[in-house]
Image (tube, grey):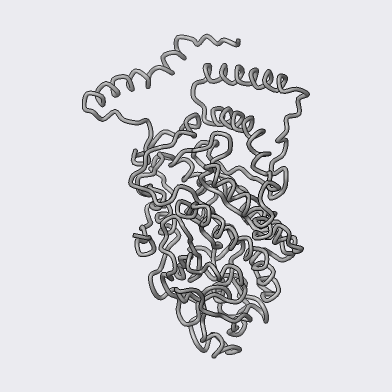
Amino acid sequence: MIRYFPTRREMLQRSANGFGMVALASLLNEQGLLGETFSPSTLTPTPDAKNRSKVRPLDFPAKAKQVIFLYMDGGPSQVDTFDYKPYLEKYNGKDPHSIFKVEPTQFNNVGKVMASPWKFKQYGQSGLWASDLFPYLSKHIDKLTFIRSMVSKFSEHTSANYFLHTGSGLQGRPSMGSWISYGLGSENKNLPNFVVINGGLIPVGGLDNFNSGFLPAAFQGSIFHATNPPVANIKHLEKTDEQQKEKLSLLRQLDGGVLRHYGASDPLESAIANYETAFRMQTAVPELMELNKESEATREMYGLNSKYQPTKTFATSCLVARRLIERGVRFIELTCASVGADRWDQHSGLKKSHADNCRMVDQPIAALLHDLHSRGLLESTLVVWGGEFGRTPFAQGSDGRDHNPFGFTIWLAGGGAKPGIAYGETDEWGYKVVKNKMEMHDLHATMLHLLGIDHKKLTVRFGGRDMRLTDVHGNVVHEILRS
């Protein structure tokens, strides 16, 4: 056992705040105000890596308990997927400057108005539109809540990715997965609470899209690969279990000694918490990845037997996501596999590359929605699909589309979202929002609301101000919520 004996000055320095807290606790107790150590309603709660597994009280009844974010990296084209615009066919090949005001684009290479290469059709009882890029997903269209009026403040990938993931275009803020994990706590001590299943493409902006920022490091995203094993060193390197336990015991003693000497330290406390989770993951992760225990019908439904490798990879990610939901993981993000193109970012070669991307995700996502629904999990799981921005209704060059932050589409499913509706509109070109504009902060506020959290109350004091996912913005969009 390692022991440290503080000097008198160190003792007074460490105890000063403690003396004040004793008096404050007494006063609060007398007034009946001494409650839980943390609630989403508590202003500026003290981050605590040690209590990350505690399930915390909600601000109001939640419709959703968990989130799956299907991240379409690069920006899918809304006018080629879910936002049907007949005017593009009517004015195909015309100069867009002669028809509407063209905003500056990322590469300033404005071509002609370009009709979608794909046909659109109405599906389901809702009659919502989808292109023939989604033969599988269109069968589940009545489960979807389309938001056709999303906007972003950024037209460049890095800042737009940070904005989508963290509510800020600047690097270093906590990801929404971290905020949600922090605000709700964990229902599974054996797995991370925020998991990113990497199909092969880490978004532009890197791992900071999944960072915990000024929240404890224990709440950052844990990267799993869509392969087996999904994380490195899942099997201990020591020759026996006893040797590993002895090594971990020594680490615990050393870390405990440092904590006693220097006082509370988030990096060290988070490291200790992560060591403990990693130890438990050695049993939980291999069991999680036993996909051979799934029925052949389930594997076939997801596309695990597909001859197209990107479909097979994304299918694995979706099936693992469902298994993580069953095990209580709060927030799961899926990144795309590579189809040999630059993500969904088709500045050229739109027809081939968008078709390849949709072929990758269509069958697995449809299977995920069906599987969650059939198991009674979709009611409590919020599924979110979308990218960081959309694309222009006119061509870049001859066969691509440039970035468009002025109006694009995402969709939600389950978790309290109202199914079978489309909220908001873009103009007749699918270029700019003309009705019910939805800002990124509104999306985050609405997601938190569905999870039972008031976005204005989930705050942390940092840098002299109260920080939150929605900054000083954001409104819950009640029109898309199921009553």
Q: Position of residue 319 (x, y in %)?
A: 63, 52
Q: Say above or below: 332 vs 238.
A: below
Is residue 35 visible in the rendered image? The answer is yes
**Among all residues in the image, which is located at the extreme left?**
31
The residue at the point 41 percent across, 45 percent down is 467
Q: Nearer the viewer, residue 324 or 234?
A: 324
Q: Quadrant of the N terminus?
A: top right
Q: Position of residue 31 (x, y in %)?
A: 21, 27
Q: Say above or below: 277 vs 169.
A: above
Q: Nearer the viewer, residue 19 or 200?
A: 200
Q: Is residue 117 left or right of residue 103?
A: right
The residue at the point 60 percent across, 85 percent down is 112
The residue at the point 55 percent across, 59 percent down is 369
The residue at the point 34 percent across, 61 percent down is 478
Q: Is residue 455 left or right of residue 27?
A: right
Q: Say above or below: 150 vs 210.
A: below
Q: Nearer the viewer, residue 436 or 81?
A: 81
Q: Quadrant of the C terminus?
A: bottom left
Is residue 151 visible in the rendered image? The answer is no
Q: Quadrant of residue 70?
A: bottom right
Count all numbered tags in the image, as a single digit.
0
Q: Position of residue 376 (x, y in %)?
A: 49, 52
Q: Say above or below: 239 vs 327.
A: above
Q: Position of residue 451 (x, y in %)?
A: 41, 49
